[in-house]
Image (cartoon, rainbow, N blue to C red):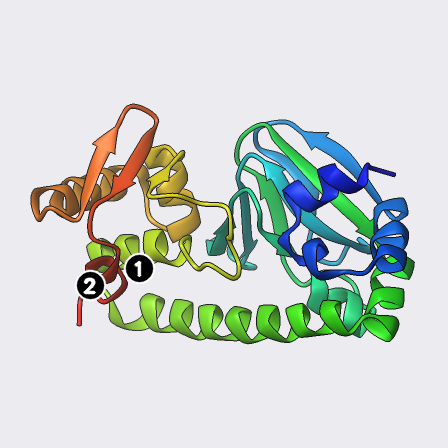
Amino acid sequence: MIAVDYLKRIATWSRGLNDQEIEIARKGVFEKSFGANEAICMRGDRFDYWTGVVTGLVRIGNVSRDGKAMSFTGLTSGAWFGEGTLLKNEARRYDTIALRATRLAMMDRTTFMWLMDNSVAFNRFMVGQLNERLGQFMALLEYGRMLDPTARIARSIASLFNPILYPDLNRYLDITQEEIGAISGISRQNANRSLKALESEGLIRLEYGGVTILDLEKLRGYGE
């Protein structure tokens, strides 16, 4: 159980709840820490929590039968995920890995379903969340099939600035080049070349341990 003020700080969805709803929500949430490269849950696991990233960076992806790693997306502070699995009451269909030291807020399924059944504000948030998630994954499918590595890097970075899925970000992204490659499904060497190309075009500025976004709109449409 966590405090009301703290929940409102780490979860934008909680700010529209009434007093009864937020009291029930906070009682169903606890926090847990994971180390760098530690598995949070793996494909086929029962993991009955709706989960928010408090600090750190999470990669969602899978490994094919022949050992090829596939990255779907990265999750930064403020992102909440796993609602689809809870709604369908099924095992996870993807691997979830902490790319760095990460702290998660975890809501049990009973609390999540109570909010779905009783809170109009929570349902409105969830409709927007699912709609944005659908658009995100349709775009990721396009990236993988149609774009070269530089465009994939550009679009992957831009996808982390969705104001619904990642509400707490500013134009500086606390992420390493290796981590960008991991969430984009691109090797570190190719990611490095692509990031330098984007910097030379004036779209980003590479910093020590991070990236500053200079032209988000051009990143979103890069490669068209």
Distance from Cα at disc 1 to Cα at disc 2: 7 Å
Q: Is residue 177 left or right of residue 22?
A: left
For label 2, the residue is: 222
The amino acid marked with disc number 2 is Tyr
Q: Is residue 133 left or right of residue 12?
A: left
Q: Is residue 134 left or right of residue 6?
A: left
Residue drawn 50% across the image and 46% down it: 168
Quadrant of residue 189 within the rendered picture: top left
User: x and y percent of residue 110 in the render?
Assistant: 91, 60
Q: Can you say which quadrant of the picture contains the C terminus?
A: bottom left
Quadrant of residue 109 within the rendered picture: bottom right
Residue drawn 58% across the image and 72% down it: 128
Q: Is residue 73 left or right of residue 65?
A: left
Residue drawn 67% across the image and 70% down it: 126
User: x and y percent of residue 113 in the render?
Assistant: 86, 67
User: x and y percent of residue 99 in the render?
Assistant: 53, 36
Are there few (<14), some (14-19), or many (20+) residues within 10 Å of tag 2? some
For label 1, the residue is: 155
The answer to whether mark 1 and mark 2 are in CB contact below 8 A is yes
Q: Nearer the viewer, residue 177 or 51?
A: 51
Q: Residue furthest left?
A: 200
Callout 1: SS: helix
